[in-house]
């Protein structure tokens, strides 16, 4: 294991399970101090416990990304974490937000667009799009004040930017918006030292990739037929792509959308 993020502070939204938890664990394993954020405190505590059990450092912050003040509080919590024993002349811990991964997202519906309720449309828009906007704005405002800037990775999807499927039109629209936000913000702020990219996972080993009533064995059989790779991606494989984009290894990668989908959209 490398240590690309030693003594750096990272914020991961939607870190209570799935891809977000895998990203938080991977960052901590490479030396980052990780703030894990999400709406439900218990799963966040489980993520923190897993990180600490492995010898890492983490802090849980309950936050709803659709609320700008919650996102700002999560960013502030990350900055307040002491990065080292160095202190300013005023005795305040020197802190920064070096990495942010905007993963929080929801899927609602599963039916044709004309059958989608206002609540299901609004919840996806509020979390998947406005939530990413809130996070980007707060993270960029902090990172551009830092000498070393920072790196942001948004979690998009193959649905929307790269493919469409019946029953996921609204979700696809929100993820297409995430792709547009990523590329536009990347151009807006790279000159300020803030590097922004996205990862678009395809079918991944999370509950979201299960069809209604489908078992994991049933999904595995379907993937053998439908996926060029023959299986879903592991959450750890998505995390590896995120860490690459967040690391100095990708120092000249700006505004890209890295697809990790087993060849489905090739």
Image: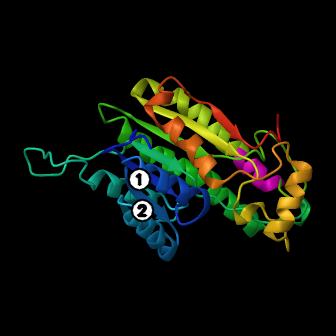
Residue appearing at x 47%, y 26% in the figure? 251
The magenta-colored residue range is: 169-175
Is 29 above or below relative to 49? above
> Mark 2 — residue?
51
In the rendered image, residue 24, in percent from the top left (x then y), is placed at 48, 55
Q: Nearer the viewer, residue 191 or 6?
A: 6
Residue 62 seen from this side = no
Residue 43 seen from this side = yes
Is 107 above or below relative to 174? below
Which quadrant would residue 108 be assigned to in this image?
Answer: bottom right
Would residue 150 appear left or right of 21 to someone viewing this image? left
In the rendered image, residue 30, in percent from the top left (x then y), is placed at 41, 46
Give SS at disc 2: helix
Q: Are marks 1 and 2 in contact (CB under 8 Å)?
A: yes
- Distance from label 1 to label 2 (Cα)? 7 Å
Q: Nearer the viewer, residue 202 or 113?
A: 202
Is 186 above or below relative to 226? above
Q: Residues within 10 Å of mark 2 (few under 14, many from 20)?
A: many
Give the number of the disc on residue 28: 1
Give SS at disc 1: helix
In the rendered image, residue 245, in percent from the top left (x then y), is placed at 53, 36
Q: Quadrant of the N terminus?
A: top left
Tell me, yes or no, whether the highlighted magenta stretch contains residue 172: yes
- Judged by its main secondary structure, the magenta piece is helix
Would residue 71 appear left or right of 7 to someone viewing this image? right
Residue appearing at x 33%, y 31% in the figure? 148
Which quadrant would residue 107 be assigned to in this image?
Answer: bottom right
């Amino acid at each position: 294991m490398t240590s690309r993020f030693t003594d750096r502070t990272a914020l991961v939204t939607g870190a209570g399970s799935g891809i977000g938890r895998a990203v938080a664990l991977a960052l901590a394993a490479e030396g980052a101090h990780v703030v894990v954020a999400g709406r439900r405190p218990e799963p966040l505590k489980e993520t923190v416990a897993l990180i600490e059990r492995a010898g890492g450092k983490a802090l849980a912050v309950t936050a709803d990304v659709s609320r700008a003040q919650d996102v700002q509080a999560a960013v502030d919590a990350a900055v307040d974490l002491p990065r080292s024993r160095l202190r300013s002349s005023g005795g305040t811990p020197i802190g920064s937000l070096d990495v942010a991964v905007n993963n929080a997202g929801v899927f609602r519906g599963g039916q044709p667009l004309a059958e989608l309720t206002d609540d299901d449309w609004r919840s996806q828009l509020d979390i998947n799009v406005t939530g990413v906007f809130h996070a980007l704005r707060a993270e960029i405002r902090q990172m551009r004040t830092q000498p070393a800037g920072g790196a942001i990775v948004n979690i998009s999807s193959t649905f929307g930017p790269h493919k469409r499927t019946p029953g996921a039109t609204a979700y696809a629209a929100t993820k297409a918006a995430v792709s547009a936000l990523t590329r536009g913000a990347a151009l807006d702020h790279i000159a300020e030292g803030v590097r922004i990219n996205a990862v678009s996972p395809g079918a991944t080993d999370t509950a979201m990739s299960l069809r209604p009533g489908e078992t994991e064995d049933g999904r595995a059989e379907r993937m053998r037929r439908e996926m060029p790779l023959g299986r879903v991606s592991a959450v750890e494989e998505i995390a590896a792509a995120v860490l690459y984009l967040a690391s100095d290894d990708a120092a000249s990668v700006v505004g890209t959308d890295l697809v990790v989908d087993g060849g489905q959209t090739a």
